[in-house]
Each structure stands twice: as structure tokens, then as C-alpha cells.
Amino acid sequence: MNFFDMKGKALRCLLLLLIVSVGVQAQTADSLVETFQVKGLIIMKGKDAKGKRIFRVYNDTAYAKERLKKNLQTRWFVVDLGFNNYIDRSDYGGAVALSYYAAPNGYADSYNKSYTYSAAGLNTLAPRGGSAPLTPSEFKLITGKSINLNIWLFQQRLNIYKHKLNLIYALGVEMNNYRYARNITYVPGYPTEIVRDNVNFSKNKLFAEYLSVPLMLNFNSNPARPSRAFKMGMGVMGGYLVKARTKQISRERGKEKKVDDFNLNKWKLSLTGDIGYGPLKLYGNFALTPLHDYGLEQYPFSIGIRFNSF
């Protein structure tokens, strides 16, 4: 055997030892890493040079692209949490003027009743004497305690153009709490009346629940990477009143609950929209129909945070 043959065998042995060594090192390194996949995220768990446990999270773009093959996607139990208030356009000035000339006899009083959003309609819903005129402050809300909670049983997104332009619709319930700062009371009946009360309430709330269907046109800047996408939607929402009640708490009367429609509009039409980046999304609903069927011309709106949405 000559020198060159011995040299070739030695090189082959060294190469074989190198391959085996690299394979053992790779196997050892791999044994220190565990990989988990949660929907669109890849989570890797391992140890650093000092033996300390570390985690790394990556976006699974393959998962997101696979989902984009579906033109119709569904989310279950989307939740909104925010605050209520309203824009008041009631004719208080006209109601004050009419209250000074209210006739004392029942016939003339019934003749002056109205079931519109006029000054006469406001006096019908919330009658006041000329010495104690009606003012907007009587319907002032405690904003921080006037809570809006919406639960959408499902929300679906239909692709229109490259998943950047979509149609989003849902079905759920809007639950609106109007917490009054003043001592007013809804007296159920036909017609309903709103009167000043002679007790101080620690809680004075009107609750209205609607079965609602929103329909929005949605824009998504980065469908393949939802966590880094700008999202915006705008549309309309229709709702039907399914429940209304008042709740009052006072030292004199304790806790009182009354169930009625309280002259609330049965149907509700609103502008609705949301805007966000990544998982954070804000929503807003602005009613185009008044809260009450006549008298008070108050247009409710709600603003808050949306959870688990597209």
C-alpha cells in the first residue's frame, strides 16, 4: 500500500468521524427544543447556554395562508364592552312654553296630548308644571356607569377581493344600560310617563336589550399576518327590542324592578363601525332612530373595545 492510498483512507475516516460528530450534536441540540403550535403561532421552548428555560414565538405564515383559501370564515362569541350616552335633540324650549299654558280641565289636557317628537309630545311623556319646567339635565347620565355589553353569537367574514376587502355580518344581542344621575321614574302604562320622584336613588337605571344584526364592509391591510394588520369596518345595524326594565335602589323603597316597554322604540337602526391594529379593535355604534317612540328625541351611541373579532 503506497502513501497516497493511506492518505486517502485517513481522509475518509476523518470525514466519517466529522459527519457522525455533527449528527450527534444536532441530535443533542434538538433534544433540548420542544415545539408547540397554537392556531397561527409557533411556540419553541428550549434552554440557553446557562440552562435557563427560554421561549420563542413565531407567526405561522403557512397557517394563515392556508386559512386564506377559505372565502367564508367564522368567529364564535365576539364580545363588545364599552359605554353608552346619547345626543339629545328634544324640544325642551317648546315644552316649557306649553307647560305655562296647560289647561286645568281634563278635556283640554287630553286634547293637547301628542305622540310625536314635538313640544306637545315631550309634555305628554314627561309632564311638568309651569313653575317647575322640564330641562335636559333631568336625563343626564352617569357615563362611567352607563355600560354597553354586546355578545355576538357568531361573526362571519366573506371574502370579496383578495381577503383585503370583506363583508362582515353577525347575530347577537346589544345590552344597553342608561344610569341616570337625577331622581326620575318611568311610570309604566299607556301612555308611559316620566316623573320627578321625591326620593334619592343610589341606583336609577334603564336597561334595553336588542336582538341585532350588523352588516359591515371591512378592509384588512395584511390578511396573511393578522397580528400586524390595520383593520377598519363600516356599515349599518338593525335591532329589535326584546327586553326593557328599570331598576331603582333607595333607602325608602329598597330595590324595585319594573318591566315594560317604557315608550322605547321597538326597532333600532344604527351606523356601526370598528377600527384597530392587530388584536386591538375599537368599535362605535350611533343610532339613527331615537331611543323613545315619541316625546324625547334622544339618539344613543356606544363606544368601546371589541374582543375576539376578525
Image (spheres, grey):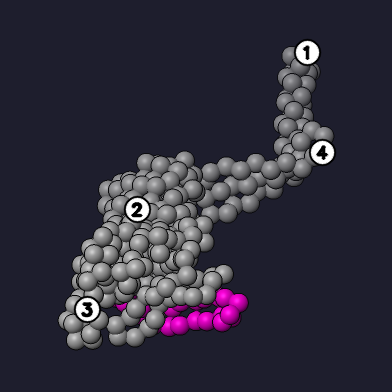
Query: What is the C-alpha distance between the residues marked 2 and 4?
Result: 49 Å
Compared to residue 116, the image places residue 218 above or below, namely above
Query: What is the C-alpha distance between the residues marked 4 and 1?
Result: 48 Å
Residue sitting at x 19%, y 86%? 107
Judge left or right: residue 32 versus residue 242.
right
Task: Decide: few, some or many residues near mark 1? Use Cα within 10 Å; few <14, some 14-19, many ≥20.
Answer: few
Q: Give the range drawn in magenta.
A: 245-266
Q: Say what secondary structure mark 4 lies in.
A: loop
Query: What is the C-alpha distance between the residues marked 3 and 2?
Result: 48 Å
Q: Residue 103 carries which label?
A: 3
Q: Are marks 1 and 3 in contact (CB under 8 Å)?
A: no
Query: What is the C-alpha distance between the residues marked 1 and 3?
Result: 130 Å
- Give the percent coordinates (x, y) of residue 265: 29, 73
User: Is 4 or 82 nearer to us in this picture?
Assistant: 82
Compared to residue 15, the image places residue 259 above or below, namely below
Q: Residue 273 carries which label?
A: 2
Q: Are marks 3 and 2 in contact (CB under 8 Å)?
A: no
Three-letter amino acid code at the position of disc 3: Ala
Q: Which mark is residue 51?
A: 4
Sequence order check: which comes first, mark 2 or mark 1? 1
Front: mark 3 or 2: 3
Residue 22 appears in the picture as rendered: yes
Three-letter amino acid code at the position of disc 2: Gly
Front: mark 4 or 3: 3
Query: Residue beneath label 1, please?
Result: 3
Q: Residue furthest right?
A: 50
Front: mark 2 or 4: 2
Residue sitting at x 33%, y 80%? 192
Task: Decide: few, some or many residues near mark 4? Use Cα within 10 Å; few <14, some 14-19, many ≥20.
Answer: few
User: Is 156 or 274 nearer to us in this picture?
Assistant: 274
